[in-house]
Image: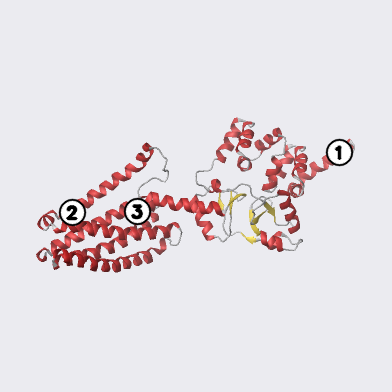
Amino acid sequence: MNTDAQAAVSALNLRFMLDYPREAAQRIEAMLPHEASVLLAMQPLQAMVPVWLSLATDVEQAVFTLLPEQRAAELLAELEPSRSAALLNRLDEAEREHYKGMLSTQVAAEIRTLMEYLPDSAGQLMDPRVLAFRGELTVHEALVRLRQTQRRGLRELYLVDDDGRLEGRVDIQDLALADPDEMLTRIAHRITDAVKDTDPREDVVEKMQQDTTSDLPVVDFDGRLVGFIRQSKFANAVQQETTLDIQTMVGASRDERALSSATFSVAKRLPWLQINLLTAFLAASVVGLFEGTIAKYTALAVLLPVVAGQSGNAGAQALAVTMRGLVLREISLRHWPKVVFKEVNVGLMNGLAVAATTAIGVFIWSRSIGLVMVIAAAMVISMVAAGFAGALVPILLQRFGQDPAQSSSIILTTVTDVVGFFSFLGIATLFSSML
């Protein structure tokens, strides 16, 4: 091709890109990545950027890595910072740092800020190497693109509109069985759930439990597809969420790890131990109210830990079941009457059964009918209160925007100790003549 013909073709390409950027992007997506990179590198930025904004995510990434480095840096500086950050996030760390080093200090700082997702956010959990397809593509065209990318392990394709916003998904099985001339929109399914890249891990767990798809798409603030979270990442997120709740239930910090330094662990644990000490003094003050009764009937001091221990265990069981229901989203705040009523009934039935066993043991030990009646009544009351508190405390904490795992156990221990001591010693004082 002579020079005049090349100049004419270049002029036509430039005019086409300036006037019809979306159509030009669709043509470029059908080209091989190295051909597309050569074509785009020849265009001025004012023509290149509108076309670039309409490219599918995977094509954008493939072409970017083949652009001349200086041109790639110019493109990053020209694009919106959020778009540049999403593009760099799909590269290896060494490549990211290399390109950021070619940018001006101000532009690099803006992009770096946007690239730093919060710990345990959807942006950190996602795989940014996502394939995006347009709904008007045929099944045959989609399969050709898939073969070109050579991506394995895909379960579904994501469809986007001309602005890169998520529109639907296509199962790989449906794609394989469809007619080659069928458009992707015809075999696509509606996206029922997606998460933003800034959403916390708790929202990811909730959405993936509600949705029946194997992977969960991730979008940015504008609704553009930026990645997806694999099922394996979801399983890990559920495990992390569950273990963190177990850790915080005993007053340990979510940030603490097995190999954390001793000073860090002390700083995180000591405040809760101090709070626990205050609640222990509260329970001790209840015992102090009945000091005279205990001094007169020393058998009460022997049996006091029995009541407190049983009510504490019963409350911990109710708390664990309720916490699990909240974490797995089996229950919500509106279910509180049903949950509390159920745990109160469980506490009553367990209390009657345990009280009967306790009564037999106490009678054999003391031969006192009065002492048997006192501890049996106290056991039933304290275990009913433990079931009530174990169910209601975490629900109330969540209702008021607090982490139910962080302080539920401390509040529960206080309730069970105070109610257990007060009921046992109070009933003993009332019926002291029978002891």
Give the number of callouts. 3
Please tell me which residue is depicted at 58% across the width and 36% down the height of the picture: 110
* Lateral position of residue 292 relative to residue 424, left or right: left
Image coloring type: secondary structure
Q: Residues within 10 Å of mark 3 (few under 14, many from 20)?
A: many
Query: From mark 1 to mark 2, how far is it between C-alphas?
Result: 97 Å
Please tell me which residue is depicted at 20% across the width and 57% down the height of the picture: 304
Q: Secondary structure at mark 1?
A: helix
Q: Is residue 352 visible?
A: yes
Proximity of marks 3 and 1: CB atoms separated by less than 8 Å: no
Which label is found at residue 408?
Answer: 3
* Lateral position of residue 172 relative to residue 205, left or right: right
Tell me the amino acid under the disc marked 1.
Gln
Residue of label 1: 6
x, y percentage for residue 434? Answer: 11, 66
Identify the image quadrant of residue 312.
bottom left
x, y percentage for residue 143? Answer: 73, 55
Proximity of marks 2 and 3: CB atoms separated by less than 8 Å: no
Tell me the amino acid under the disc marked 2.
Val
Residue of label 2: 287
Mark 3 and mark 1 lie on one chain; the one further toward the N terminus is: 1
Q: Secondary structure at mark 3?
A: helix
Please tell me which residue is depicted at 61% across the width and 35% down the height of the picture: 94
Mark 1 and mark 2 lie on one chain; the one further toward the N terminus is: 1
Identify the image quadrant of residue 427.
bottom left
Tell me the amino acid under the disc marked 3.
Ser
Q: Is residue 402 visible?
A: no
